[in-house]
Structures are given as C-alpha cells and as structure tokens.
C-alpha cells in the first residue's frame, strides 16, 4: 500500500486518452434506432437530469464506502427489460466510446458494478428477473437481475422438496454471485451455485446473444466462477435444482472464550470438513462488549448448523463426531428447507417467505472484507492471538465456512473456482463502520489483521474468494495490464485456472471493452 502515490498518477495518465466527453444525445439516438429494441427508451434510460437518477443509482449499493458524492457516477443508467435493449446498450456504448459496468444485485464489495474512473454507463438488470421453475424436469431458467431470495422463493412456491445451493443473503444478485461461484449452506452436498449451471445466455462484445451452444465450452466454463464482468452481460442462467428433504434441522450453540470456545474451535477445524455432506456447521465469531464496566470484552463463537434430515438422525452422529459441542435436542429445531433459508437470512423461520422478495437489505454500512483458505489446523495459541486482534474492534467478525464433502470431489479445473480438495475451511474477515472519517483507520486495521493471519493460511499463492472482492490483492491500473501484473490478484482467486481465463478473455473480447480493476488482461498478439 506504500505504493499508492505513484500509482495514482499512473491512473490519471492512462485514463486521459479515453476521457473524451460523453455525447448523451448521440447515445440516446443510437439506442432508440437500434433495430431490435422496443422503441420505449423513456423508462429504459435514466439520465443525470432525471429526478430518479440518484435513487436508482444508490438503491442497490451495499457498501456505503462507494455512496459518497465524490465517487464517479455513471453518465446514464440503462435498465433493460429484454435482451435487445442490452444488445443496443452494448453496441451504442462502443460506438460512442463509453465504458459499461453491469449490475445485478449491487453487492460487489469494492463497488465495481457501479463505480469506474472512466466515463461509463451502468446496465442494471433489476427489471429482468423472471424465474421459471420446471418442477418435473427439476430445472429453472433464471434471469440474472433476480436475487437469490427471489430464486429461493420461486422454487419453494412450486415444490417443498427442491432447492438450490446458492448463498445465504437473499438480496445478493444471481448475476454477480453465480458468475463468481456462490457458497451457501448446502454446498458441501451439492457444490457451488456455479456448479449447477447447465446453460446461460450472454450478450457478448459484438452485441450478439449467445447460449451455451453458441458461446462454446470455453466461454461457458469461464463465466461459471470467473465472474461475468470480463466477458459480457449474462442475462439468464439455466440451473439444475437439487432435492431437499421435507424436514431439515437447524441449530446454534454459542460459547465465549471463557467457556472454552477456543478449544471448541480448534476441534471444529478438524471435524467440520469431514462431516457427512448432509451436515453444514459454520462458526461465526463476534466481539462481546459487557454491560458492566468491570467485566472485560471477550470473543464469542456461534456454531450454527443445518442438517438435511431430522433431529433423531443428527444427534447421535454429532454426539459421536463432535461431543465437545454439547448439542442437545433442545438446541435443535426442525423446519422446512425454505424456513431454513429464512433462518440463515436472519428472519424468523415462522414469518412469511415473501420477505425474500424484498430487495432492500435491512441494514447497510461501510465495510471492508477479506478472505482466506485454511489447509492445516490453526493452533490454539495462534487463535488466542487472533482474538487479541479482533477484540480491538467491536464491529469485527469472522465467518468460518467448512469445505469438504462434494467440494473435495470436484476437480479444481472443472470451473474457474479452484478452492476444492485440500481446503478445510474458508475465512471471511469483516469490519464495519458508519462514517467516511473512519475509512482509513478501519481499512488499515483490516490489513493488520490480514497480515497477522499470513503464517496460518494457504500460501503460494495466498488464495482468496473472488466474490469477496478485495482490491488490496492487486488491481489493473491500465487497460493494457499485462499478464504478469494481473496474475498478482488472478492467481489468488483462480490459481491454476487463471491462464485459461486469460485465454478465453483474449478470444472473446480482444479489444478489452469489458475492462475493470479486476478483469482478465488480453494477451498481446505475439502471445496468443
Ligand atoms: C451482504 C452480503 C452477503 C453475501 N453472502 C454471500 C454468500 O452467502 N455466499 C457467497 O458466495 N457470496 C456472498 N456474498 C458475495 C456475493 O456473492 C458477491 O458480492 C456477488 O458478486 C454479488 O453479486 P451481485 O449481483 O449482487 O453484485 P453486483 O455488484 O451487481 O455484481 C458483482 C460483479 O459481477 C458483475 N456482474 C453482475 N451481474 C452481471 C451480469 N449479469 N453479467 C455479467 N457480469 C455481472 C458486476 O459487474 C461486478 O463485477 C455476499 C455479499 C454481501 C454484500
Ligand atoms: C422501432 O421504430 C423503428 C422506426 O419507427 C421501426 O422501424 C422498428 O421496427 C421499431 N422496432 C420495434 C422493435 O418495434
Ligand atoms: C468515495 O468513494 C471513492 C470510490 O468511489 C473512494 O475511493 C473514496 O475513498 C471515497 N471517499 C471518501 C472520503 O470516503
Ligand atoms: C442447549 O440446550 C441446553 C439444554 O439442553 C441449554 O442449557 C443451552 O442453553 C442450549 N444452548 C443454546 C445455545 O441454546
Ligand atoms: C479483565 O482483564 C484484566 C486484565 O487482563 C484482569 O486482571 C481482570 O481480572 C479481568 N476481569 C474480569 C472480570 O475477568
Ligand atoms: C424491505 O426491507 C426494508 C429493510 O428492512 C424495509 O425498510 C422495507 O419496509 C421492506 N419493504 C417491504 C415492502 O416490506
Ligand atoms: C498501454 O497503452 C498505452 C496507451 O496506448 C501505452 O502508452 C503504454 O505503453 C501501454 N503499456 C503497455 C504495458 O503496453
């Protein structure tokens, strides 16, 4: 990070040559004349003069760090209602030399779906969110503007014994999450969301609509874990739905470090990734601030579980493999799968599942997150050091997600997501805050935490999950970033798959129209 200053001047220089002023009138003309689009531009395009511009721009922004007035804002926002309007937006952006950012749910940790240093427009897919569930065939076509909550809701309305293995937060967009992987509570049994994609529709850089057959297996491979943003605008996925039992069991056991949580977590590291794939048991840490000024702050660890079956089968198995947890019948609740979705989303499992259709997060904050993969157990002594660090910031927490199960059986190169066998668990580090003034202090604190953890996590490369995007891992400062420069972040997210991703990028978008701070570089002609 010491290199910040010189890099800023590089950004400035390298962006000059594209910084011609944006010709909005010509864009609107181009868009309305596009033969395929439906001639109803009024609702489809929102310009800066439009009174709804600010609210439309800000509505799905999740990280308040990128909601400030000095963030560069788009020239206009296109909210297509059909693929032709996406085609028109792509063709016209290139004609007028303006960049494009694509947004589905707006949850990108670094704001890449709605902030760019170059003149840009946003294609926001919020109006394309049809979910078509075929119960007989156990398949669904899902438009990418849908949230995972809308997807789960639609499935549950049609069947009590079908589900889908995407993430836990219902407001996340299907477009961003599935193209980057998608880790959730049933992924030890069914893999990532991306592992369950069997077809997709994309508008490519030429403005062509391509399905799996037309795009070919290389591009179809790349968009299932490599992120969509480097390749085009994905507007629909075809998913395989997965069976879920009519009754599942959830449970939660919380302990502080005074109650031996460190020993429990130490044990958890060794067992959670070996459990039967029907059992998911994650650990979430938090800082507890006591009400009495005499007591000290402490760390609590909540062990939260989902079992794809009934209590009577869960109890004996966990009492055998993890007796230290002290799980009892009273700690467990049986419910339907969709109720477990509500439960893990933080809603009451007895409430109406319609809350899954609400696209607004209950609370938004400023945040900085990072991720790691753990391949060997971390000692209790090192964990104690971790607690000492976490206790410095009350808003910090970690989410430890166990891998194993089917995740270890899928090959590292089956999709771009490479974090399969050999990984015991994934750590997500999170710190939040409420005002811009705290940005530097909080981000620096997070970097210290990350430095502390370096000896205990995966190395060469120190791997990371691309859906927990982190620009500290490296970024493209220029459009013509080289392979070597991009591999700094690329190998962390994609390990051995990075090379193939760069080749697919080079073949599908040779002029690098779909550029962002962490998009794949295009190989120079000599290296193709
Ligand atoms: C509160 C919260 C909870 C989360 N929980 C989980 C979880 O349980 N499991 C998990 O795996 N991840 C989780 N994530 C991470 C999440 O999966 C990623 O942030 C994901 O990329 C967000 O997708 P989005 O569509 O909402 O984001 P966006 O910001 O809209 O997009 C993210 C990236 O994908 C690109 N993109 C989006 N849509 C398209 C498209 N249609 N075509 C091409 N490119 C596109 C964007 O340009 C951007 O680069 C969580 C994030 C948050 C903020
Ligand atoms: C849009 O309008 C043009 C000119 O009036 C017309 O030629 C074209 O067919 C229309 N497109 C659609 C999809 O209706
Ligand atoms: C405002 O947002 C930009 C990114 O859009 C960020 O780089 C900058 O640090 C933010 N400014 C402040 C004062 O937080
Ligand atoms: C688990 O159940 C026991 C009783 O069997 C109870 O004492 C304990 O508080 C419960 N734990 C939680 C986290 O609910
Ligand atoms: C709080 O921490 C201090 C210093 O470590 C220790 O001396 C004291 O006993 C602790 N208080 C409680 C209530 O645990
Ligand atoms: C959606 O959720 C937000 C945040 O929790 C809440 O303020 C809003 O009222 C909800 N909208 C509806 C229609 O329930
Ligand atoms: C990138 O492009 C710019 C502008 O065309 C050029 O000046 C620069 O030398 C190029 N850099 C590399 C690494 O190719």
Image (cartoon, rainbow, N blue to C red):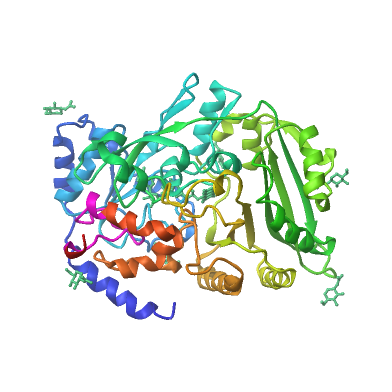
In magenta, the rendered stretch is 506-525
Residue 430 sits in quarter: bottom right
Residue 28 sits in quarter: top left
- Most foreground residue, 105 or 322: 322
173 on left or right of 375: left
Residue 510 magenta: yes
- Most foreground residue, 275 or 76: 275
198 on left or right of 185: left
Pinpoint residue 209: horizontal percent, then vertical percent: 24, 36
218 on left or right of 177: left
Q: Quadrant of the N terminus?
A: bottom left
- Most foreground residue, 358 or 182: 182
Pinpoint residue 136: horizontal percent, then vertical percent: 49, 18
Instruction: Classify the position of ligand 5 by quadrant: top left, top right, bottom left or bottom right.
Output: bottom right
Q: Is residue 352 above or below residue 506?
A: above
Residue at 52% of width from left, 41% of height from top? 166
Pinpoint residue 268: horizontal percent, then vertical percent: 72, 55
């Amino acid at each position: 990070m010491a290199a910040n200053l010189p890099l800023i001047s590089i950004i400035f220089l390298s962006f000059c040559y594209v910084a011609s002023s944006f010709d909005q009138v010509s864009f609107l003309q181009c868009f309305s004349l596009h033969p395929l689009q439906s001639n109803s531009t009024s609702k489809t395009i929102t310009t800066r003069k439009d009174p709804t511009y600010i609210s439309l721009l800000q509505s799905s922004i999740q990280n308040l760090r990128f909601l400030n007035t000095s963030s560069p804002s788009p020239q206009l926002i296109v909210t297509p209602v059909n693929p032709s309007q996406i085609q028109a937006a792509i063709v016209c952006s290139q004609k007028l030399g303006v960049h494009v950012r694509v947004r589905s749910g707006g949850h990108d940790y670094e704001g890449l779906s709605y902030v760019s240093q170059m003149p840009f427009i946003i294609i926001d897919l919020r109006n394309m969110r049809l979910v078509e569930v075929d119960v007989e065939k156990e398949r669904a076509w899902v438009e990418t503007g849908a949230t995972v909550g809308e997807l789960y809701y639609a499935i549950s309305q049609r069947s009590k014994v079908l589900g889908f293995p995407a993430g836990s937060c219902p407001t996340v967009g299907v477009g961003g999450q599935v193209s980057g992987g998608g880790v959730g509570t049933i992924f030890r049994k069914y893999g990532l969301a991306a592992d369950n994609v069997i077809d997709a529709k994309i508008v490519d850089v030429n403005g062509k609509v391509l399905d799996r057959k037309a795009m070919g297996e290389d591009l179809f491979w790349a968009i299932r874990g490599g992120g969509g943003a480097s390749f085009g605008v994905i507007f629909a996925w075809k998913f395989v739905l997965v069976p879920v039992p009519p009754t599942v069991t959830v449970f939660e056991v919380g302990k502080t470090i005074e109650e031996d949580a460190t020993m429990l977590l130490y044990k958890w590291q060794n067992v959670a990734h070996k459990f039967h794939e029907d059992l998911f048991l994650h650990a979430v840490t938090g800082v507890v601030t006591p009400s009495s000024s005499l007591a000290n702050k402490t760390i609590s660890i909540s062990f939260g579980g989902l079992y794809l079956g009934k209590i009577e089968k869960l109890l004996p198995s966990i009492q055998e493999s993890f007796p230290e947890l002290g799980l009892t019948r009273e700690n467990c609740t049986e419910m339907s799968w969709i109720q477990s979705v509500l439960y893990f989303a933080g809603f009451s499992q007895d409430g109406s599942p319609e809350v899954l259709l609400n696209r607004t997060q209950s609370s938004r904050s400023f945040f900085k997150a990072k991720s790691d993969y753990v391949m060997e157990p971390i000692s209790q002594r090192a964990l104690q050091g971790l607690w000492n660090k976490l206790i410095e910031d009350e808003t910090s927490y970690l989410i430890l997600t166990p891998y194993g199960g089917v995740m270890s059986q899928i090959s590292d190169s089956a999709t771009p997501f490479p974090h399969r066998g050999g990984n015991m668990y994934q750590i997500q580090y999170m710190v939040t805050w409420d005002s811009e003034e705290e940005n530097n202090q909080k981000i620096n604190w997070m970097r210290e935490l990350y430095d502390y953890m370096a000896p205990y996590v995966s190395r060469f490369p120190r791997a990371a999950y691309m859906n927990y995007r982190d620009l500290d891992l490296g970024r493209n400062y220029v459009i013509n970033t080289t392979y070597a420069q991009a591999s700094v972040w690329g190998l962390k997210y994609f390990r051995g798959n990075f090379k193939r991703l760069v080749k697919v990028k080079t073949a599908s978008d040779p002029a690098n129209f779909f550029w962002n701070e962490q998009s794949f570089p295009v190989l120079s002609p000599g290296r193709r």
